[in-house]
Amino acid sequence: MGVLQGHKRLLRQMHQPAQRKHTLSEVFPATACDAAAVGFVLSRLPRRAGPILWVQDRLSRKEAGRPCLAGIGTARPVIMVDLSRAVDVLWAMEDGLRCKALAAVIGEVWGDPPALDFTATKRLALRSEAAEVPCWLIRRAASADLSAARERFRIASLPSAPHPDDAQAPGLPRWSLDLFRSRRTKPGQWVATYDRAADRLDLVAAVRDGTLAAGDGTAGRRAVG
């Protein structure tokens, strides 16, 4: 029952982001250029007015490109900041978190630069919590070293869900999601599907979680291979 309760608690947090205490979260794409991280972060942002500050370092911009932001809508303008060094990205993110009018602050850093240490992540977490502005750090080609991030995810793209009306068309986007560190709920692994109409994440537990219904477990096994 403990695993199932933890799964339900995480579902509530995923579906009701506006009620969560905003802080620093990190996402590690399975492959450096996987767009899953961008899609996942966008799906987790609170639906409130205000611009999004998005900061990229040079290598993230060169190797992964600029994020495709179609679908965010005119009510959520994005302020893109292109910088060269990771230390400048961290400074810009921290400075942006002083502004409570922002809807979110997102940063992309390539690799494991010396500037991105525990102290730097601690400063981002404290700024985010003080301003009540969510902060996301996308870590491409990076190792999950010591960090003060309150939630840390590994994520990878999966084949889309079947389309309900056309077997040849892509359905809802899906990701393999591994919450490997959290101060809020029990870590676990899921297949995440983003429901555009409901604007929410639906989670299916990995196959080794035998507490869920047989139908959900079967879907999870197919998705994660």
Image (cartoon, helix red, strand yellow):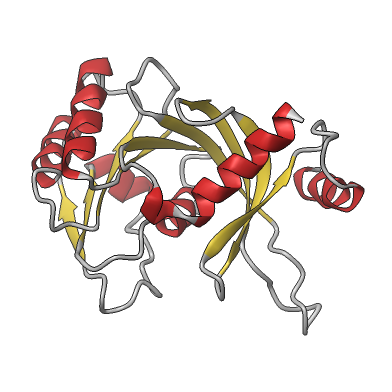
Instruction: State the count of labels.
Output: 0
Name which residue lies at 15% across and 43% down: 97
Q: Foreground residue, 113 or 129?
A: 129
Q: Foreground residue, 67 or 94?
A: 94
Q: Quadrant of the N terminus?
A: top right
Rendered view: 44 above or below 124: below
Q: Quadrant of the C terminus?
A: top right
Outermost residue, bottom side: 165
Is residue 40 toward the left or the right of residue 148 in the image? right
Q: Quadrant of residue 42?
A: bottom left
From the top left corner, tell me how far across and down residue 59 is, in percent: 29, 41
Name which residue lies at 29% across and 65% down: 48
Rendered view: 146 above or below 154: above
Is residue 15 toward the left or the right of residue 87 in the image? right
Q: Foreground residue, 16 or 154?
A: 16
Rendered view: 9 above or below 169: above
Name which residue lies at 19% across and 59% down: 80
From the top left corner, tell me how far across and down residue 176 is, in percent: 64, 44
Q: Quadrant of residue 21?
A: top left
From the top left corner, tell me how far across and down residue 223 is, in percent: 77, 50
Name which residue lies at 12% across and 42% down: 92
From the top left corner, tell me how far across and down residue 152 is, in percent: 46, 31
